[in-house]
Amino acid sequence: MTQLACFDDTSAFEGLDRAAFTFSHQLLDHPALNLSNLGRAIPALPKEQVFYSSGALEKTDDFDRAHLDKKNGLSIEETIERIRVSNSYIMVRSPEDDASFKDLYQALIADVTELMRRRGVGDVPLDPMLYLFIASPNSVTPFHVDRYSTFLMQFRGKKTVTIFPMFDERVLPASEMEAFMSHDGRTTYRPESEALATPFDFAPGQAVHIPFMAGHHVKNGSDDVSVSMSIIFNTAQTRAMSKAMMLNHSLRKRGLSPTPVGQSGWRDLGKSLVFRSMSRVRRAIGRSS
């Protein structure tokens, strides 16, 4: 068994993509995550990788459009400089494109690869990527769902991450999840489902696993700026579930009522293979037309 470099080893990792759980990380002193380096690296990244908005959001706001609908009226440089008092939220996609993050990214990939092998869900993470989050005190990340698995690590400040059970139709109907996976709709926060969620309180050095397609929202603490980072990825298993959801969405648009994903592993795998075959046929037709 390969030793983990970034995470404290724990039996909790056996729950990968089965349930949310907490663990500790060993990256607090990494120089890429100090505010001085972030102030240099973030403005240097391509603009399409940096999203920022007001932090005065609600759980019900559209997370994917916050940078368009809830602008803070500042430049990214001003937002970083005034992050403690500007009530702002910054999200950076693929900070590993900056040289200061490259060794950190490779070390995290190695840990994720080892954990996937232990769990038996593939030999390599699919489409892995880092996301960086910097937020003013008391800012809110609205309820949303991710199309991948996540390990979220806290580096500065405190926050509460509230995570809902995956594939629970009291949180999100299967049809809504399938449309979201197919990029044909958004997910909606339902206040009545809040009792089903589990809140996790975080301080620097702590981390949480957010399972594939598990809804969640975040509230940052009042005492300090929050700096956190996630590594996102898919496994062979979650990739198959993604394809199965997209097939289900296609079937529902034709008036059928397919069995929701997450109830039968063999059925989900079969659907993913059918969707893959249909996609190949469509691509072949497109090339020949």
Image: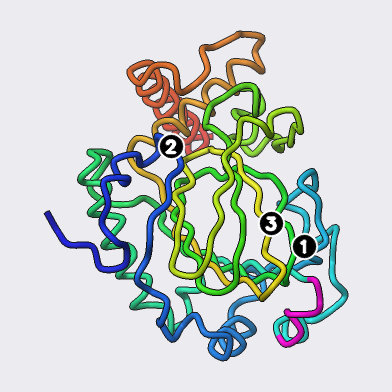
Q: Earlier in the sequence, mark 2 or mark 3?
A: 2
Q: Which residue type does callout 1 highlight?
A: His
> Which residue occupies the foreground of this view, 234 or 139?
139
Q: Earlier in the sequence, mark 2 or mark 1?
A: 2
282 to the left or right of 51? left
> Which residue occupies the foreground of this view, 95 or 202?
202
Instruction: Give the residue at mark 1.
Output: 67
Instruction: Give the residue at mark 3.
Output: 219
Secondary element at image label 2: loop
Q: Residue at x 66, y 31 (%)?
A: 195
Instruction: Give the residue at mark 2.
Output: 19
* Residue sitting at the far top: 256
The N terminus, quarter of image: bottom left
Residue 6 position within the rendered picture, expressed as x and y whole percent measured from the top left: 31, 67
Q: Is residue 85 part of the magenta span, yes or no?
A: yes
Residue 204 position within the rendered picture, expressed as x and y whole percent measured from the top left: 49, 70
Between circles 2 and 1, the one closer to the viewer is 2
**Numbered range of the magenta stretch:** 81-87
